[in-house]
Image (cartoon, rainbow, N blue to C red):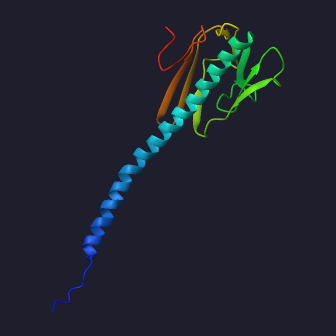
């Protein structure tokens, strides 16, 4: 009668554990990049939707609509507000949530608000605005042209 025990030897278990550890160490950086890329796409998409909303509201209402940081100043990574600029900032139409920690958003120098006129074009500032977003190794660019067109990537040219 054969009394061999069934199971794995210690060497087989150690080799299997070593392979699992190697696979995990290779997968974690790729997973992190994937998460960052997804978060970057979401946050830039939220910003682009807010810009489009402000532009379309300006056309619909026939008045100037403003997008600016809720706290004022030039901290564009915080909460943003879209409001009717003919009244006070109490006329908030939409609030865009703050971006994730670690994200940076830089704009054309000196821009504190974006105003869309009744035709959907940029009323202020008087030049095209470039948003540069960075989160970890991910970067995105968003351009707001003078005619109000919002482009992801390329230039207004």
Q: Position of residue 149 (x, y in %)?
A: 57, 13
Q: Position of residue 144 (x, y in %)?
A: 58, 15
Asked if residue 4 lies left or right of residue 42, the reply is left
Asked if residue 128 lies left or right of residue 27, the reply is right
Query: In this rendering, is residue 29 above or below 151?
Result: below
Asked if residue 129 lies left or right of residue 4, the reply is right
The structure residue drawn at horizontal position 70% and vertical position 13%, both measured from the top left corner, is: 60
The structure residue drawn at horizontal position 34% and vertical position 55%, both measured from the top left corner, is: 23
Q: Position of residue 88 (x, y in %)?
A: 84, 20
The structure residue drawn at horizontal position 25% and vertical position 71%, both measured from the top left corner, is: 12
- In which quarter of the view is residue 25 placed? bottom left
Total numbered labels: 0
Query: In this rendering, is residue 131 above or below 10?
Result: above
Q: Position of residue 75 (x, y in %)?
A: 68, 29
For the N terminus, which image quadrant?
bottom left
Residue 136 in view: no
Quick one: which residue is furthest to the front in this view? 60
Query: In this rendering, is residue 15 above or below 143?
Result: below
Residue 120 in view: yes
Foreground residue, 16 or 91? 91
Quick one: which residue is furthest to the left in this view? 1
């Amino acid at each position: 009668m054969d009394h061999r025990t069934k199971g794995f030897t210690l060497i087989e278990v150690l080799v299997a554990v070593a392979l699992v550890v190697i696979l995990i160490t290779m997968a974690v950086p790729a997973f992190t990049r994937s998460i960052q890329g997804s978060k970057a796409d979401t946050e830039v998409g939220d910003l682009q939707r807010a810009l489009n909303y402000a532009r379309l509201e300006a056309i619909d209402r026939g008045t100037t609509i403003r997008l600016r940081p809720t706290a004022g100043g030039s901290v564009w990574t915080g909460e943003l507000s879209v409001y009717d600029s003919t009244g006070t900032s109490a006329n908030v139409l939409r609030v865009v949530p703050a971006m994730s920690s670690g994200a940076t958003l830089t704009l054309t120098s000196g821009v504190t608000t974006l105003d869309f006129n009744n035709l959907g074009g940029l009323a202020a500032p008087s030049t095209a605005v470039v948003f540069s977003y960075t989160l970890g190794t991910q970067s995105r660019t968003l351009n707001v042209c003078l005619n109000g067109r919002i482009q992801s990537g390329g230039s207004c040219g």
